[in-house]
Image: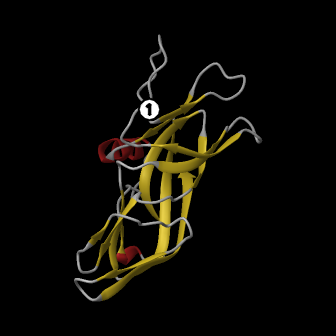
Amino acid sequence: MVLYLLYIKGDLEGVSEISLRRDQNLCISVRNPQSDYEVREKVVFNPSETVEQEENTREPPCHFALKWEGSKKRSILEVLDAGAAKTALKKKKVKGSQPRSYTGDDNGEWVPILAVECRGLEPYAFHPMTDEFIVTSEGDVNFDEDVDLSEGDWADYDAENDASVSISTFESKFEAV
């Protein structure tokens, strides 16, 4: 299986941390690595739910599965937790790419936030929807509702600390490890 990391970056104002929620739907686009024209745009899956396995199969549990035209086997995507990501990265002899939260110190830098293992498909785009991120202000106030980065920016007001909170020029990318 091929390991992919989802990286994000953005310009933060008044934000100490952006973390990915593991209980919300994620939207990605995938393509068949064996074909230039077979793609599935904006497929949605939940990292906290596994897909039912086909009968008489020895496939591991996965979070998303599909069958490409003419294929006998399902192509699968599995979201890795912190321990599994660490092990997979260690096997690949990659250092410093542990998925983690994006912090104020990372402002404008690419940071891995999610690790997925895939067989027979390749994620190539992440499409933010609403509520897949928790934003923590510099005053330690959590914004976990209506955080919509689909347009590339988000702003709110931290009333407890009388400060504006914003994320601008948000970008994301998948990279194979």
Indicate left or right for 72 with 134 as reference: right
Left or right: 33 in relation to 83: right
Residue beneath disc 1: 62
Query: Element at badge 1?
Result: loop
Say which residue appears at 71% left-offset and 27% top-offset.
69
Residue type, label 1: Cys
| Image quadrant in which you'd find residue 145 | bottom left
As drawn, the residue found furthest toward the right would be: 37
Direction from residue 169 to residue 95 in the image, left or right: left
Extreme residue in the top direction: 56
Structural crowding at the residue carrying mark 1, measured as other residues with C-alpha within 10 Å and reported as few (<14), some (14–19) or many (≥20): many
Q: Is residue 177 visible?
A: no
**Residue at point 52% right, 44% down?**
44
Report the front residue among 99 and 11: 11
Q: Residue furthest bottom?
A: 162
Considering depth in this image, is 8 or 67 the residue closer to the camera? 67
Classify residue 75 by image quadrant: top right
Residue 63, image x and y in percent?
A: 44, 36
Q: Would residue 129 be visible to someone looking at this image?
A: yes
Identity of the residue drawn at 44% across and 24% down = 52
Q: Nearer the viewer, residue 136 or 104?
A: 136
| Left or right for 24, reference 161 | right
- Is residue 135 depicted above or below 81 in this figure? below
Please say if 165 is above or below 113.
below
Residue 165's x, y, as percent?
37, 81
Compared with 149, 11 (above or below) is below
